[in-house]
Image (cartoon, coloured by chain):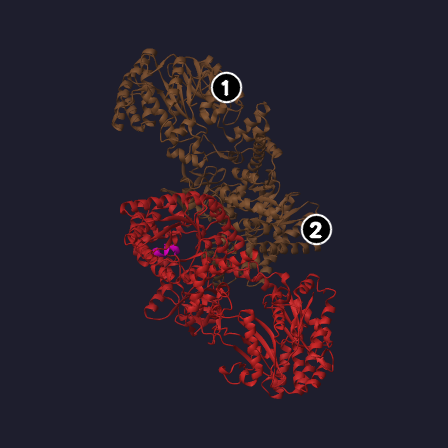
Chain colours: A red, B brown
Amino acid sequence: MHVYFFGAGKADGTKDDKNLLGGKGAGLAEMTNLGIPVPPGFTITTEVCTHYTQHGGVYPPDLKDDVQEALRRVEDLVGARFGDAANPLLVSVRSGARASMPGMMDTILNLGLNDDTCAGLVARTGDRRFALDAYRRFITMYSDIVLRVGRSRFEEALARRRAAANVQHDHQVPAEALAELVAEYKQIVREATGKPFPTDPAEQLWGAISAVFRSWNNDRAVTYRKMYDIPETWGTAVNVQAMVFGNQGEDCATGVAFTRDPSTGERRFFGEYLPNAQGEDVVAGIRTPLHLTRANGAGSLEERLPEAYASLVAVYQKLEKHFRDMQDIEFTVQRGKLWLLQTRNAKRTARAAVKVAVDMVAEGLIDRDTALLRVDPGTIDQLLHPTLDPKAPRKAIAKGLPASPGAVNGHVVFSAEEAEEEADKGRRVILVRTETSPEDISGMKVARGILTSRGGMTSHAAVVARGMGKCCVAGTTEIDVDEAKGQFTVRGTIVKRGDNITLDGSTGEVFLGEIPTIPATLFDEFKTVLKWADEVRRLKVRANADTPDDARIAREFGAEGIGLCRTEHMFFAPERIAAVREMILSADEAGRRAALAKILPMQREDFVGIFKAMEGLPVTIRLLDPPLHEFLPVEREDLEELAREMKVDYETLRRRRAALAEFNPMLGHRGCRLAITFPEIYEVQTQAIAEAAVEVARAGIKVIPEIMIPLVAVEEEIAKMRELVTRVCDAVFAAAGVRPDYTVGTMIELPRACVVADEIARHADFFSFGTNDLTQTVFGLSRDDAGKFLPAYVERGVLPKDPFVALDRGGVGAMMRIAIERGRKTKPRIKLGICGEHGGEPSSVEFCHEIGLDYVSCSPFRVPVARLVAGQSTVRGTAAISSTA
Amino acid sequence: MHVYFFGAGKADGTKDDKNLLGGKGAGLAEMTNLGIPVPPGFTITTEVCTHYTQHGGVYPPDLKDDVQEALRRVEDLVGARFGDAANPLLVSVRSGARASMPGMMDTILNLGLNDDTCAGLVARTGDRRFALDAYRRFITMYSDIVLRVGRSRFEEALARRRAAANVQHDHQVPAEALAELVAEYKQIVREATGKPFPTDPAEQLWGAISAVFRSWNNDRAVTYRKMYDIPETWGTAVNVQAMVFGNQGEDCATGVAFTRDPSTGERRFFGEYLPNAQGEDVVAGIRTPLHLTRANGAGSLEERLPEAYASLVAVYQKLEKHFRDMQDIEFTVQRGKLWLLQTRNAKRTARAAVKVAVDMVAEGLIDRDTALLRVDPGTIDQLLHPTLDPKAPRKAIAKGLPASPGAVNGHVVFSAEEAEEEADKGRRVILVRTETSPEDISGMKVARGILTSRGGMTSHAAVVARGMGKCCVAGTTEIDVDEAKGQFTVRGTIVKRGDNITLDGSTGEVFLGEIPTIPATLFDEFKTVLKWADEVRRLKVRANADTPDDARIAREFGAEGIGLCRTEHMFFAPERIAAVREMILSADEAGRRAALAKILPMQREDFVGIFKAMEGLPVTIRLLDPPLHEFLPVEREDLEELAREMKVDYETLRRRRAALAEFNPMLGHRGCRLAITFPEIYEVQTQAIAEAAVEVARAGIKVIPEIMIPLVAVEEEIAKMRELVTRVCDAVFAAAGVRPDYTVGTMIELPRACVVADEIARHADFFSFGTNDLTQTVFGLSRDDAGKFLPAYVERGVLPKDPFVALDRGGVGAMMRIAIERGRKTKPRIKLGICGEHGGEPSSVEFCHEIGLDYVSCSPFRVPVARLVAGQSTVRGTAAISSTA
């Protein structure tokens, strides 16, 4: 069946026919079946679209007859004839795909008008202005969408008419002028297309239908489908429906409504309408719409058309109860009678989504599993950070990557020192850098937000900022940062040191001046949703945390352990880096040991603090990972200063720095490679961990250290490191007479580690997937350099998403599967986790659930997201299983 | 059975018992069975070694009895008793593993001596000096090997005796002094060990046996086994054998011989001996040995002991015929009677290996398959390049990586310009750089050899030099190159611009001054062996060649196509790089196209030349691969000069350079990523290829272009690139009316490409494994930086070999297997090749054969090596199959 009819309380389709009828068509059918007043009409199925596309614009042979017959049924119900000059039926034509699809043709209203039917409409309605207004609207829409003439020439002509009539609004243009305008419009079309505007309503109808189907394959739609993995074969449906008019007088109106407040989720009917208007007027925003309910202000529909309003209330309650979800509806009141034109599940803010879901469980509309799935985890970051006040005016001067959410304003500074100085004075600062490096950590700590011109979603700035829960816009390639001059420029605008700017880390936008923000609150419904997620999820959620403070925050957010405690940050603290540099410059092992001995007690204290904060929960500590040159300054003057401080010859220092320099530091002398050449580094770190564990255990606090070896590629590396760790721990524990349990495992962050996971598993108690580096090596893609071409990749559909943001299932994921399969072959119960940035990204967390990891670990502020997704994944998995059974 | 006896024409074992008896033991048994005179003795099996190791130094319970019984049989045959003061039997104890194993205990002679038996020996032989000399030798060897006292104190004592006696050689020390020396030696042992030297012959024997078994697990042996993949479980055997003496007078002698000339392979008996000497004297090199045959000089064994010589000739002929291979034998003549002490397949030069193999086929000793396997492919590089004259004295001042073979000398220069200037004056130059870059190519071309202080076996210098067939020593970390000063230093020695040095690219050694070399020759037997290999091999061999000249050389070496024609070298030519830079600096596509238009005709000419040179053979052309910043200079002054040349603002140029700079260029904006952002680059390259193909095809020359896309990670990349290539080729061919066949394929050089090979294969006609980059990404290891720690990895046994030299089967090889399996799932007959540096390395070529690649591609000079290994692999495969059947 190509054509599904709906009208007079009976429809061929139902809400379950979304695949065939599209969202809009299924909604119209369902409402019709529910006895809700819907103007009669019919839906041409998505299968026709597919046929049309696959056969080069040819329709199935019997389609014309089917449409003809459906149209007759509409005519009978309405009591008017399509193309009848005396009593014309007008229709609307709208697209409607399975999923909402920006970029496709949308709506043509008033189709069926020509000079004759327009005259008929005047005669039937007695309203010449109304009929001519409908006519000029139709010509504009049809010419724009079907004939591709473009709106601007029509709008210019209309503006001239307004000026001539000396009026401000379109509805004030007199009928005579509209008649002249219609003639002028037809002339515009003739000039642009070389042909007269089509007068045959049948030709108009098929032109509109074909335009909808063609728009399924226009560039914007194709790109959109690629981005969202929508198959071309889905196709779109076309809805043809009898027109009802909200612009036939003061007893007419048109509007949109939400069954609950889409911003807060509150259970109150919420919407806007325009009296005496056609649908597009509400969207155009020229007239200010009025509220629906009396409680919200004067001129409400409730006051002006109380009967229609009562019908609307009955309808919305029925719809919400029926669909068991908050609805977004479109309606028209024609001469006092209510008509519904659309219903669909409403878009809503994160806050509203949470509240509606929890409320509906309480109301008995849905169960908890359904409620969990109603919250989009991609949006709840909004609930954990301040956001820009949506009412505040703003204009972005630049847009970078939304690297770490939140909205902040402050005064621009260009160096870490400056940030600290200004912060000491009590000023709010935003640190702007070309890119950040570990030396900037102290400045990042005191800054309210970070803005960089280079680097991607997992650049240093992005990773550190997310770890700190601090707003960051990264890789803003449009801005040119001149740190020496103390300014940055963006398309002619110069922003100087001390200027005030605002960052939106959730959109990546940068604004001049201060824009007000709304603070975050962890409200009760949100806690409820997270509790429900915790009750069902199988996947554990840990946090990446390097300090006792981070550990405490993580715990408050519900982390069940630390999945990644990076020790290099401990080496960068100002009072320690001198010792680290001394170690690097030592000519021999004895010298290195002497320098390390200075760091040992400080590291031990760090671990004591973290172990205490995480009492009873596991703490995975990664031994030193970065290449040693990261601990030495890059600039000549900094190096000269360091030489003076350390009382060494500048040339010696320069040579050492040069000898350590690497062409590809990402693939260089780092991770456990450092400990193969300088085992003393890991020995001292292990000693600090073991001693801290002893100290905490003696205080009666349960401690569960998991020592993690980074960058293992070869079995012998982990074998040697395990031997080293065991030897040092045994010695410390033997001396102390206390023997806390501990485990030794490895990061899986290199492709080789994945394929030899069976060999590595012989020496590892756990695997933690380091998917940042794994993504870099699997793709051969430096996250620090990818900013130059990765955006083009995503834009042109070469990659669906930035793989540093959402885990690449086909490549990186495939390597993870290999590692899991091989690792379990050796050790069936080996513990598996992930500690890359993906551990807090919804689609990645879901993947981690699917492939059977034991836990994910992410920034403390992402822990709630991960908990929610873990819960949703279990629900979806259960649903999938029970639907199979 | 723990103990295998041999003696009097009958042995328990045979040559086939190598696993149980070791190489030496099996040889002694076989010779005994052949009726060749061998002093009687017995072999304790490798199984005993394994038992001893696994049971913490405990022997199987019945071993003592078995040894006792075997010893009795030896006593009976010799007619002397072990430990009998009147008529003592003396024995030798030697290790003998399955494979020759440096680092293990070697030999103890004259075991069984103490003061009593020494007196008995004096009485029996009437030669006090002989007996005491045997005694002091025994104490030295036993103390060194079993008691671990060290040789130096014994040698000092001996030196004092020589000085006191005022003689130069040990054999001139009088008997009385030797008696005193023996007493002094025993005192040294007592002081060093706190115990007297053992006098009980049985204790001596078991001490020696245990020392052999223990030495199987000493550090050097363990490291050696790891390096050569020798399992610990193999164990070593111990050979105990009655002593025969070559030092009992002028009718005695001891010597070593080869059945053919081990240096040239000529069929002539070849060896050296010392009259009146014991084995170790020949090795020690204190006395100059004499020739065996009269033809070779005075004092020959043939003249002095003609009967013994005749026996020796009969024996060697018998042995060679029996073993069907050239033998290396040890013998002793005691009182005119010949005794054989060892036979084994002889080590030989590459040249000799080839000649012996071909000769033996002609002599009917072996078949062609066997002959093929007799040539070690690792050594035949020697035959393709000049080598240092082995007779010339030399002392290396530094040792780097043997990056490209050959031996050259010349005057040191430190820049490409200097190299060209000096070469223009007709001087031989050696280019010394910290590392080379593409800008150095012109200098590398005119230099005779290249020496760098940084970079590994696949650094720029190494790869380019091998491609040019030019000697290169890379990564010589000991030397400190100061290009500005025009000198390099190595441990205090300063080598200045213009100084003469010699490089040995086969060993990595660097010498001061000029050392004479021997030129390479492609002699007939070598051609014969390669022909035999060609007749059997399944794997095709192609060459990596970028120019018509390279292509011609490759073809002469037997290449069956070009597997990798890099196009970037074409961009670096001086007359082109200006246009390339213009392209890079263009702000828009139009500017880039204008610049590319200048390069197009030049590239087309390159391809015409290569296609002509490779008439009828496939040519795989890789489109542009390196990141664009490689085409811009790094140093400020060079950049300033370029700005003047290009008439652009220096600051603009600097900014563009800075914008292109990358943190990890290896993982950056390169390969097909360039063409995703700038498709015009590949379009113009494809146009040049297509136009060249048309031009050559019109001339009646068969052309088979294979267009290869580098760095593909994602299906959409190869899909887009295939579309691009096809579109451009179609246009060119349609315009020309000529349509040469061509294919489009991809490098597989990223882990992601391996796991999604099924998707990539949809758009690729062939896969070519780029194992250089694949090794880098699978390991997460930059080949340019690995020099800092990879040597330590190999030294400490973390990695068995440098994975950039020999393909890492467990990791990189596993990824290749995944790619092949998945690629063939989509396209079962997809063509598979390798074009990484591994394509010319023997063990890697064998692996490529095993996993079913269609071809390997390597530097032209490695083509013969690859042909040989490909042939050997087929033979081994066939042998494996027929031995299973």
Image quadrant occupied by the N terminus of chain B: top left
> Which numbered tag is attached to residue A686?
none
Q: Position of residue A544 (x, y in %)?
A: 40, 57
Pointer 1 or 2: first along the chain = 1
The tally of labels here is 2
**Chain bearing mark 1:** B
Q: Residues within 10 Å of mark 2 (few under 14, many from 20)?
A: some
A193 or B543: nearer the eye?
Answer: A193
Residue at the image point whose x is 49% and y is 76% from the top: A268
Vertical relation: A174 (above or below) A424 = below
Reply yes or no: does residue A563 show up in magenta.
Answer: yes
Residue under pointer 1: B316
Closer to us: B708 or B548: B708
On screen, residue A17 above or below B376:
below
Q: What chain is tagged by disc 2?
A: B
Q: Quadrant of the C terminus of chain B?
A: top right
Relative depth, front residue between A729 and A559:
A559
Q: Please, what is the three-letter code of the amino acid marked with disc 1?
A: Tyr
SS at badge 1 = helix
Residue A345 visible from this viewpoint? no
Determine the secondary structure under disc 2.
loop
- Let me know if residue B112 is in the magenta part: no
Mark 2 is on which residue type?
Arg
Q: Is residue A320 left or right of residue A463?
A: right
Q: Are marks 1 and 2 on the same chain?
A: yes
Query: Is residue A9 at least partly visible in the picture?
Result: yes
The residue identified by callout 2 is B739
Q: Specify the segment rendered in magenta.
A: A561-571
